[in-house]
Image (cartoon, rainbow, N blue to C red):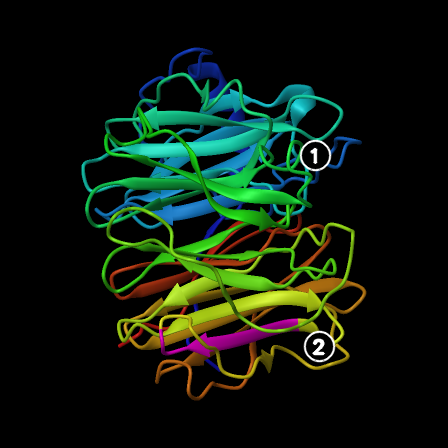
Amino acid sequence: MPEIRFRTLYAISLAIALGLLLAQRGSAQTMPEMSTMHRMAAPPCESAQPLGCVDRATAAFAPDGTLLLTWTQDQKVYFARSKDVGQSWTLPMWIGDTGAGFDGGGDARPQVVADTAGHVLIAYDTFKDQRWNAQIWLAASADGGAHFDAARVFEPESVSQRLPLLDAVPSGKILMAWQDKRLSGPQKLPGASIAYAWSADGGRTFSASAIAASTSCECCRIGATNTVDGWPILVFRTIFPGKVRDHVVLRFLPSGLPDKPRRVAVDDWITDSCPHQGPSMAVSTKGTIHVAWYTQGKARQGVFYARSNNAGRGFDDPQRLGNPDDVTSRPFVFAHGEQVWRVWKTFDGQASQVLMQRSRNDGHDWSVPAVIASAVGRSDHPMLIGYRDRVFLSWLSSEHGYQLTELENPR
């Protein structure tokens, strides 16, 4: 079993009330540091609504090691940060109110990213009509997350923009990509398209948006990381002829323009429905691309992983994560150097478990799967984040609240 250390924020919901007293609509307030939160079980959700409690949280490390956390509760978006890897937190900051347009899709969640200049950007979407057309909201900070400008709609006149993704590149730019419906109506294309825009000023302004791929599965999140040359690479579920919803990778060139998509595997999942299960991606220092995904195709069913050592032009045969009879979902993969971790969820009818495997040789060999977290009741997607030589599981559940679990040190 791997060495695992726990840094757990159980009572974040208790601090939300204090944050609301200090947060005002239209401007963000300076939040004083909060003392270490009590190590106690999260209070039970008393709301009759499934979204009445904290239901999804996204964490990321800023380049200076500050831990950034954004989450949704009561159809509102909040933010907090920690300078000591989750031992203490600022009081929660109110970012935006999604109201009746709350996007409760399985892959919908607020996104957060920080660049080396101290800019922090939060993005989320809301539905704007009864036809599931959405719009993206952005909130930008120029001082590391101490203050945020009021959240604004990214492109008010857009047809539909949903499931935003944020990625900061070493050059200092920030890429935002999303599911876009501008081609779905006039060109009668199925699903959506992958659109993108670049920001060179920490998210205050963006270039004109453009299409990176004309077809994609409209309800699945986009996975992303940076290649060894410092440019983004995306993985997403697309729609091939015959209503086949399989995965492709797409990298951005030094010009900032997208290359052509390349297929990960032929799962042959033929469906008109929305899977609500997007893929995950990591790239090692050797340039190996690691991808994990969910499928119910003719060729294979369940959660799978594959790697490519030729820039995505071809992938190894997919490996199943978990046993064939397991109820598996939500895979996530993370790389540090030539170390690679992969996690996924299982459900045994009573509890959800997060299983982990580690490779020390760029995905050639893997450790025996180990349970690193478990919870009864509702739980979020497991995600992996890292800073320098430290790797963490970021996970939220109704039983335990928010958990930040440090995995064994890559060294």
Q: Secondary structure at mark 1?
A: loop
Circle 2: residue type:
Arg
Residue 59 appears at what percent x and percent y? 43, 47
Label 2's element? loop
Q: Position of residue 175 (x, y in %)?
A: 35, 42
Percent coordinates x, y for residue 336 in the rendering: 31, 69
Q: Nearer the viewer, residue 326 or 408?
A: 326
Viewer-closest of 78 and 341: 341
Against 4, is 277 above or below? above
**Residue under pointer 1:** 51
Residue 94 screen position, x and y as percent: 47, 23
Tag 1: amino acid: Leu
Q: Quadrant of the C terminus?
A: bottom left
Tell me which segment is drawn in magenta: 303-310
Residue 69 in the image: above or below residue 48: below
Q: Residue at 21%, 50% (x, y): give it.
A: 170
To which quarter of the image does residue 182 belong?
top right
Name the outermost residue toward the bottom: 365
Q: Tag 2: Cα neighbours inside 10 Å, few (<14), some, or many (≥20)?
A: some
Whether residue 37 can be seen here? no
Residue at 65 percent of width and 56 percent of height: 239
Task: Check whether the beta carbons of the residues at disc 1 and disc 2 lie within 8 A of each other.
Answer: no
Which mark lies nearer to you, 1 or 2? Answer: 2
Q: Residues within 10 Å of mark 1 (few under 14, many from 20)?
A: some
> Is residue 236 found left or right of 67 in the rendered image?
right
Residue placed under numbered mark 2 in the picture: 300
77 horizontally vs 352: left or right: left
What number is the disc on residue 37?
none
Main SS, magenta residues: strand
Q: Residue at x 31, y 64 (%)?
A: 390
Please say whether residue 189 is one of the residues in the magenta stretch.
no
Q: Quadrant of residue 99?
A: top right
